[in-house]
Image (spheres, helix red, strand yellow):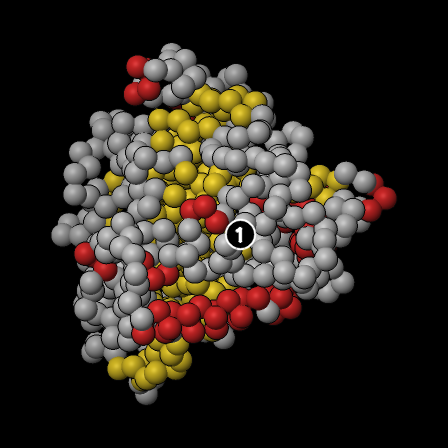
Amino acid sequence: MATEGGGKEMNEIKTQFTTREGLYKLLPNSEYSRPNRVPFNSQGSNPVRVSFVNLNDQSGNGDRLCFNVGRELYFYIYKGVRKAADLSKPIDKRIYKGTQPTCHDFNHLTATAESVSLLVGFSAGQVQLIDPIKKETSKLFNEERLIDKSRVTCVKWVPGSESLFLVAHSSGNMYLYNVEHSCGTTAPHYQLLKQGESFAVHTCKSKSTRNPLLKWTVGEGALNEFAFSPDGKFLACVSQDGFLRVFNFDSVELHGTMKSYFGGLLCVCWSPDGKYIVTGGEDDLVTVWSFIDGRVIARGHGHKSWVSVVAFDPYTTSVEESDPMEFSGSDEDFQDLLHFGRDRANSTQSRLSKRNSTESRPVSVTYRFGSVGQDTQLCLWDLTEDILFPHQPLSRARTHTNVMNATSPPAGSTGNSVSTPGSSAPPPLPRSNSLPHSTVSNAGSKSNVADGAIASGVSKFATLSLHDRKDRHHEKDHKRNHSMGHISSKSSDKLNLVTKTKTDPAKTLGTPLCPRMEDVPLLEPLICKKIAHERLTVLIFLEDCVVTACQEGFVCTWGRPGKVVSLNP
């Protein structure tokens, strides 16, 4: 075994790593792959993706796993840390001709031991609805490719719905479907429903209801991934043009935007309480964006190549009380939050927002998230107090939020969270392009995500000021050449008719849309380990393990500290 961070052994693949919680261990017998276990020759094929569903059956072994490798799709019982994987008995296996599966998603709402609804997107643009338990193929959407001919990049069921699903394509378009409706025999005709900066939403014009119900055109180039907020009300999209765009899903309004440091954004995820969004992309960075403040609050640098997946770990994210007298609510509230419970999570959310405004600061919060990349490395990151709340309580005359000299990390967190820990009362930067901190406290309100967004009003101010600033930039030439270069050529996609002006990356740099590197705290990873031979494409945090997968088609299970059963043969 290579020593931790060893010199010439750096290329050796790690099979375990340690964090403050303890030892995470790779379980070789819990590896899932094609039955022959032969590494897949991944040149030119679509990324391996993994989807999970729990069937809530009585046996206590209700987890099911689906993954795609090349032209093949597999569906297995997932035994996790409990028992070895039996690859000789996939519940279902499909091999496709002429097209490859690119992504998939289970409907958790309708899943039972007898039946499960799995959506599969394909490289030629179709979407298939299958039931791997009944071994049925019930429907094929966009069969004639009349709706969109480009590759499906992301497919997800709309949260809380048994029949609605959303599909993103490399054309930069997204479509809302209903499984009950047909796609028609002719190309759809559209009518404009709403238009805004770099996006437009159309409804389908037809006498009888047909798919798609809505067509979204977002940004320039491919729409690489989208993610629904935990309460299902907001939709975060990342595109090849380097923009994160966050929409209110029902009202189809743009809530906020953020620009990558350079290159396309490839992946996106929400914190369990819906307060923060993390993105990763071609700038090799992870970027943390505050949903309520509508601004970048930190960047993380640890990867040596493109970041392909980001994900929060809801089981390690923690809220701790430091003064029992100030603390309201029970531990159960936070457990509900972790399991994305929508009803009682509000009390934890209000505690977290009260944390933003109370002088005594009774609640201490740490968010854990992870990322994997084309550099075959897994990075884990902690988002701690000093990044989330970088200021001592002070009069809010002219407070700037982005401060490089963040306060020193709180006890219990690792000291390498911030690259430049400074004094406990940091001086504001001489030139900060960030927005003033929101002075609104949500403590007394019912602070669900939407209320918080409306209450703070920062994001409205942010988008207004950004658009004005962008227009002013177009009038006068930029004096300096930045080394950003152009966004990758993939983004010169002619399918998009919405965007009127192309955003020059050099003109967004230094604005709140894309702060300079020195204007926001730079996180360092807790751990950064090479764990595969090929680029990593999957990172999923489960209760007793972490699941990763690489382009060779191996799905790996890492037992969490104290969760590994010694019986694992």
Whether residue 369 is visible: yes
Corner quadrant of residue 120: bottom left
Whether residue 85 is visible: no
Horizontal relation, residue 288 to residue 316: left or right? left
Residue 521 is situated, as x and y percent measured from the top left of the image, at 51, 43
- Quadrant into which the C terminus falls: top left
- Quadrant into which the N terminus falls: top left
In the rendered view, would you say 538 is above or below 228? above
Residue at 16% across / 43% down in the picture?
Answer: 44
Residue 38 is situated, as x and y percent measured from the top left of the image, at 22, 27
Horizontal relation, residue 299 to residue 315: left or right? left
Residue at 47% across / 41% down in the picture?
Answer: 522
Residue 515 is situated, as x and y percent measured from the top left of the image, at 44, 54
Residue 229 is situated, as x and y percent measured from the top left of the image, at 51, 58
Q: Which residue is mark 1?
A: 430
**Three-letter amino acid code at the position of disc 1:** Pro
In the rendered view, would you say 241 is above or below 268? below
Q: Residue furthest left?
A: 98
Residue at 37% across / 53% down in the picture?
Answer: 260
